[in-house]
Image (cartoon, grey):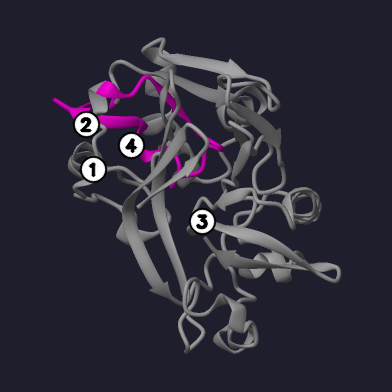
């Protein structure tokens, strides 16, 4: 699945697709609540009210760069807080190659934040050691996000994620730390959207008069556009998360900006009174 914003091509590589209850991530999104939002169906939810979501990477190809945005869960990882995320064996790299992007062709890896499902393929296991998956790439982390997780590991799971998927990148001298509003290249600029995590960012794309927005996890699902006060379970600061959602959705509502989520597909944000709806591209 791919989309275009001017000269920028965005390709989705899915690691895991899911359909069903997500009470561990969005506890307020009951089947009954979702069925009351018919504009979500069928693209983002089923008739029964089950959410459609995925864990995926977005490969952003500009005239000068090949950037992987967020890297999923990764294979062979252990110590994850969701048991089914441990010791995965997914064809992620093969799927990326089939899409036309072999790992060696990637020159940049960017993580919108450093949660478990956005950093996993930063590294791979080789002879018992975690090494950078994308050997020819520079990895870009947002400085306050990196520093927070370097200094704060609230659970053993957070510690495991940092140790196997972030620290090896720093040890290999492959990382670059940037400000939350940095410009990644001519077409891509970061937008600070903290709340889900302390240094979370989204990405604004501009090319040939067209615009795109990669939201990261500012919202896990479009239902949070209608219910901006619905907080995702991992949000570090729910009040700030709500503020970031309101500001971001207000900025891009009723425009031709192509929006792609960290866990949902492309669409356009429409204002409805003081709330927002989302319609598939």
Q: Mark 2 points at which residue?
A: 125
Nearest to N terminus: mark 1 or mark 3? 1
Q: Mark 1 points at which residue?
A: 76
Looking at the rendered structure, the secondary structure element under dot 3 is loop
Q: Name the residue under label 4.
A: 121
The mark found on residue 266 in the picture is 3
Q: Nearer the viewer, residue 208 or 45?
A: 208
Q: What stretch is highlighted in magenta?
A: 105-133
Do the residues under discs 1 and 2 have CB atoms within 8 angstroms?
A: yes
Residue 221 falls in image quadrant: bottom right
Q: Looking at the image, is mark 2 or mark 4 nearer the viewer? A: 4
- How much space separates mark 4 and mark 1, taking CA atoms? 10 Å
- How much space separates mark 1 and mark 2, taking CA atoms? 7 Å
**Residue in the picture at 35% in, 52% down:** 1
Mark 4 Cα-neighbour bin, 10 Å: few <14, some 14–19, many ≥20: many
Q: Does the magenta stretch include residue 54?
A: no
Do the residues under discs 2 and 4 have CB atoms within 8 angstroms?
A: no
């Amino acid at each position: 699945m791919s989309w275009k914003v001017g000269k920028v091509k965005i390709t989705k590589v899915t690691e895991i697709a899911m359909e069903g209850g997500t009470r561990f991530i969005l506890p307020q999104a009951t089947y009954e609540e979702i069925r009351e939002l018919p504009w979500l169906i069928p693209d983002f939810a089923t008739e029964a009210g089950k959410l459609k979501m995925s864990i995926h990477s977005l490969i952003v190809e500009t005239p000068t760069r090949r950037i992987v945005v967020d890297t999923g869960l990764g294979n062979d990882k252990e110590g994850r807080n969701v048991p089914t995320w441990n010791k995965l064996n997914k064809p992620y790299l093969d799927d990326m190659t089939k899409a036309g992007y072999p790992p060696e062709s990637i020159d940049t890896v960017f993580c919108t934040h450093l949660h478990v499902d956005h950093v996993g393929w930063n590294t791979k296991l080789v002879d018992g050691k975690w090494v950078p998956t994308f050997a020819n790439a520079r990895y870009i982390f947002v400085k306050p996000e990196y520093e927070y997780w370097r200094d704060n590991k609230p659970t053993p799971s957070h510690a495991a994620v940092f140790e196997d998927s972030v620290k090896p990148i720093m040890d290999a001298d492959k990382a670059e730390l940037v400000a939350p509003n940095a410009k990644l290249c001519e077409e891509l600029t970061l937008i600070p959207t903290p709340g889900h995590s302390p240094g979370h960012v989204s990405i604004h794309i501009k090319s040939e008069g067209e615009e795109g927005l990669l939201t990261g996890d500012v919202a896990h699902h479009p239902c949070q556009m209608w219910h901006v006060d619905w907080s995702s379970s991992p949000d570090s600061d729910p009040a700030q998360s709500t503020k970031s959602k309101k500001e971001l959705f207000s900025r891009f509502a009723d425009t031709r900006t192509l929006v792609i989520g960290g866990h949902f597909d492309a669409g356009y944000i429409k204002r409805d009174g003081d709330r927002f709806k989302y319609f598939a591209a």
